[in-house]
Image: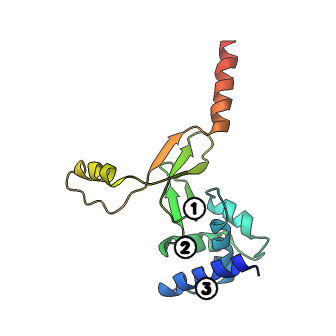
Amino acid sequence: MSRSSSTSDQVLRRALEARGHRFTDQRAAVYRLLAHTTIHPTADEVFLGVRDEVPGISLATVYKSLETLASCGLASKLSHADGSARYDGRTDPHHHARCIACGSVSDLPGELRDSDLSYVRSGADGFHVTGYQLELTGYCPDCARESDGEAVAAVG
C-alpha cells in the first residue's frame, strides 16, 4: 500500500469510527477514488473505477459507500434538478460549474465573501442560512465549441 493510500485510509478510518461506521475495503476503495479524482463521478463511474481493485464489489455497495462518505463529511453529493447525482471528494470551500449539455461538473476556486453572504442572508426573509452551495450552469468548453460549430454550419 502506498503512503498516500495509507494516509487516506487513516483519515477514512477515523471519520467512520467517529460516526459509528466500520472501515471496509470497499469504502476505502471508493474514498480513495473520490479523493484522487478531479472529476465529479456518478455512482456508476465510481463502480467502474473501483471494480478492478475490489472485483466482487456491487453497484449497491458503491451507492451505500458513497452515502456513508457523504454522511461523514468526506464527500458531497451533488444532486441536480433532473434527478442525477455526482459525488465530490473535495471538502474545501469551492464552487461548481455544470455543463447543461453533457452534464460534466468542474470545480471553481473560492467561496462567497462575508459581505456577499450577508447580502444573501438579508434577502432570505427570515430563512436561517446555515450553509450554501453555488453552482453555475452553462456550457463546458467542448460543448460550447460544438454548439458554435453547429451555429456556423446553420448560417453557412
Q: How far apart are marks 3 and 1 (CA)?
A: 20 Å
Looking at the figure, which quarter contains the C terminus?
top right
Q: Which residue type does callout 1 highlight? A: Tyr
Can residue 20 be seen at all in this image of the molecule?
no
Q: Name the residue under label 3.
A: 23
Check if mark 3's residue and mark 2's residue have beta carbons within 8 Å: no
Left/right of residue 86 with respect to residue 130 in the rendered view: right
Q: Mark 2 points at which residue?
A: 69
- Measured as percent of width and height from the top left, residue 109 is found at 52, 52
- Asked if residue 150 is positioned above or below residue 128 in the image, the reply reads above
* Residue found at the far left of this picture: 126
Camera-nearest residue between 135 and 56: 135
Check if mark 1's residue and mark 2's residue have beta carbons within 8 Å: yes
Q: Distance between the residues labelled 3 and 2?
A: 11 Å
Q: At x 67% / y 31%, what residue is drawn?
A: 145
Q: How many labels does the image show?
A: 3
- Measured as percent of width and height from the top left, residue 18 is found at 48, 86
Left/right of residue 132 with respect to residue 44 in the rendered view: left
- Measured as percent of width and height from the top left, residue 117 is found at 32, 53
User: Which badge, 3 or 2, comes first in the chain's sequence?
Assistant: 3
Assign a secondary structure to mark 2.
helix
Q: Name the residue under label 1.
A: 87
Q: Which residue type does callout 2 highlight? A: Leu
Q: At x 52% / y 62%, what residue is drawn?
A: 77
